[in-house]
Image (cartoon, helix red, strand yellow):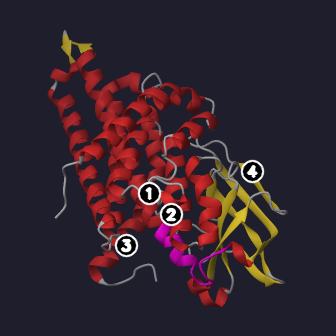
Amino acid sequence: MIEFDLTDEQKLIRETARDFTDREIVPVARENDRNERFDLDLVRKLGEMGYLGPIVDEEYGGRGLDYRTYGLIVEEIGRGDSSARTVVSVQTSLVCSSIERWGSEEQKHHWLPRLCTGEILGCFGLTEPNTGSDAANLSTRAERNDGGWRITGQKQWISMGNYAKVALIFAQTDPEQQHRGLAAFLVPTDSDGFSSSEIHGKLGLRASDTAELSIDGVEVGDDALLGDVGDGFKVAMSALDSGRFSVASGCVGICQGCVDASVAYAKERQQFGRPIASFQLVQQMLADMIVDTEAARALVWRAGWLKDTGQPNTTETSIAKLFATEAAVRSANNAIQVHGGSGYVDDHPVERYLRDARVTTLYEGTSQIQKLIIGRAATGVNAMA
């Protein structure tokens, strides 16, 4: 049975994350967004708070928190700025969780303590220029050589790729094996043949670093292999199960931010001699936002509970990701409508909420992919095969 009451520890962690967000993230969010500035000082502070590896075991430098508590942290950070939330999600769910689950003891002790503190950043190199949803059909190749591997390919839309010191690179070792030939490698980004370039002109997440990676004959040893050859697809899918939960949690934060901003504005803004909060259609928009927020939060908490109790949760995580991301877009649209013309400029956070929410329906599995996962679970028929 899902427990909806938070423990005293969870309440304290949520309150601490809320205070941190209001003190450290909200005041710089607009300027970081305007200037497309990846805020390394803020990244350092996130690391100091233990927010870059909260679900990692304490033995490896994390905080050993459960997923539901992790979701509370991510929700608060997402309420402040989705660009900051992206750092937490990628570092924790995609990189750290993959190393902790699939890595050797040597790999875990080598990489995780520095990743959890923010001493170094990591990135998740799955998506390619011609490969997005079809994750099993990668063009990046890994070929055996003396004592290791030679990797060649390109990756695109890689968060933190220009700042990462280690890249989790997915490559095909045998195209005839399809997904059974995929392998994952921990590649130091200072390796010969590894380079990155910035991607500019994004609609949202402007304060988040996004890169294209070039991997030109990069050579790594067998000790760079994460898991075994053929495990790459399972590594990617397990990472996305964690990442989708984190994205969904952050979108609950966007929804809550839209509610908070819109309620405050509607009570303050006067038209026809009274606050617009007294107008029925404004209250309807507020109610829609509140219902979306509460429903999204409940779905996220259910997914977190299933993860924490060791139960299958891929479908439930997809449900949470699908609903929360689409709810964030709806809420941001409604919030701008409540704000009127004022919502169209960045004096208020709601226009940034809309721009930042839009990509969440695309990455880590589009909304359409989530529907196919849900449909597969319901029918037993794989429409992606």
Q: Residue 124 at x, y = what percent?
A: 60, 61
Check disc 3 and give the amino acid type.
Ile
Check disc 1 and give the amino acid type.
Ile
Q: CA distance from mark 2 to mark 1?
A: 8 Å
* Quadrant position of residue 134: bottom right
* Frontmost residue, 308 versus 135: 308
Q: Secondary structure at mark 3?
A: helix
**125 over 247 or under it: above or below:** below
**39 over 377 or under it: above or below:** above
Residue 197 disc label = 4
In the rendered structure, which segment of residues is drawn in magenta?
225-239
* Frontmost residue, 39 versus 48: 48
Q: Secondary structure at mark 4?
A: strand
Q: Secondary structure at mark 2?
A: helix
Residue 373 disc label = 3
Residue positioned 57% across, 26% down in the render: 31
Quickly name the residue at label 2: 97
Instruction: Say whether residue 130 is left or right of residue 311.
Output: right
Residue 85 in view of the camera: yes
Q: Sequence order check: which comes first, mark 1 or mark 4?
A: 1
Instruction: Look at the image and say whether residue 358 sits in the magenta stretch.
Output: no
Q: Nearer the viewer, mark 3 or mark 1?
A: 1
Q: CA distance from mark 3 to mark 1?
A: 25 Å
Q: CA distance from mark 1 to mark 4?
A: 30 Å
Q: Do the residues under discs 3 and 4 have CB atoms within 8 angstroms?
A: no
Q: Do the residues under discs 2 and 1 have CB atoms within 8 angstroms?
A: yes
Spot the residue most to the front: 59
